[in-house]
Amino acid sequence: MRCPYCSAPDSKVVNSRPGDDGGAIRRRRECLSCGRRFTTYERAQLEPLMVLKRGGVRQAFNPDKLLRGLTLATEKRPVAAETLRAFAYGFEDEVQAPEIDAREIGKRAMTFLRPLDDVAYIRFASVYRDFDSLERFIEEIQGLKEEG
């Protein structure tokens, strides 16, 4: 770690403790060249969850994108926004792999919506499964009736 005062490359750690937000380590350092003390903060840099899209493209998981889809599906339905937010922002922590297929995200979202609200589930499924006809839409609704 370079000294901010004299730019010397070497310093020693004098004190180390968790930062105020808990997501960093605060270190007090002393420059071995000029003897002045300074503070550094170190954060863990985690690799983002990667999403494998249908066309083979990989992109970083974006919880806002998932939340937007869930919000559209539950619009004017009795589902708390906080419930949706908790699912979307906790999703990355639940996945135990460095990469996930986009279809798997859709499946998990449908599994999440199913017990919350039938209408929201159908709305999400209509986009996710890309219903191409009224018959396919009716089949899905009949499947819900048989389960419930």
Image: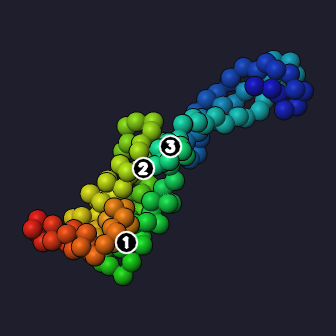
Q: Secondary structure at mark 3?
A: loop
Looking at the rendered structure, the secondary structure element under dot 1 is helix
Within 10 Å of disc 2 (Cα), the crowding (few <14, some 14-19, many 20+) is: some
Q: Nearer the viewer, mark 1 or mark 2?
A: 2
Side of 22 where 104 appears, left or right? left
Image vertical order of residue 15 relative to residue 115, above or below? above
Q: Which mark is residue 102?
A: 2
Pointers 1 and 3 in contact (CB under 8 A)? no
Q: Work out whether mark 2 precedes mark 3 in sequence or the reverse, and give the earlier one.
A: 3
Q: Which is in the foreground here, disc 1 or disc 3?
A: 3
Above or below, 87 relative to 12: below
- In the current view of this chain or complex, which residue is farthest to the bottom? 76
Q: Earlier in the sequence, mark 1 or mark 2?
A: 1
Q: Position of residue 85 (x, y in %)?
A: 42, 62
- Of residues 70 and 23, which is closer to you in this image? 70
Q: Position of residue 41 (x, y in %)?
A: 66, 36
Q: CA distance from mark 1 to mark 3?
A: 26 Å
- Tell whether label 3 touches label 2 (CB within 8 Å): no
Q: In what element is the residue under mark 2? A: helix
Is residue 81 shown above or below 56?
Answer: below
- The residue that appears at 45% across and 36% down in the rendered structure is 98
Q: Nearer the viewer, residue 89 or 147?
A: 147
Mark 1 or mark 3: whose residue is earlier in sequence? 3
Q: Position of residue 76 (x, y in %)?
A: 36, 82
Kindly identify which residue carries mark 3.
56
Image quarter in which the N terminus is found: top right
Q: Which residue is mark 1?
A: 73
Amino acid marked by disc 1:
Ala
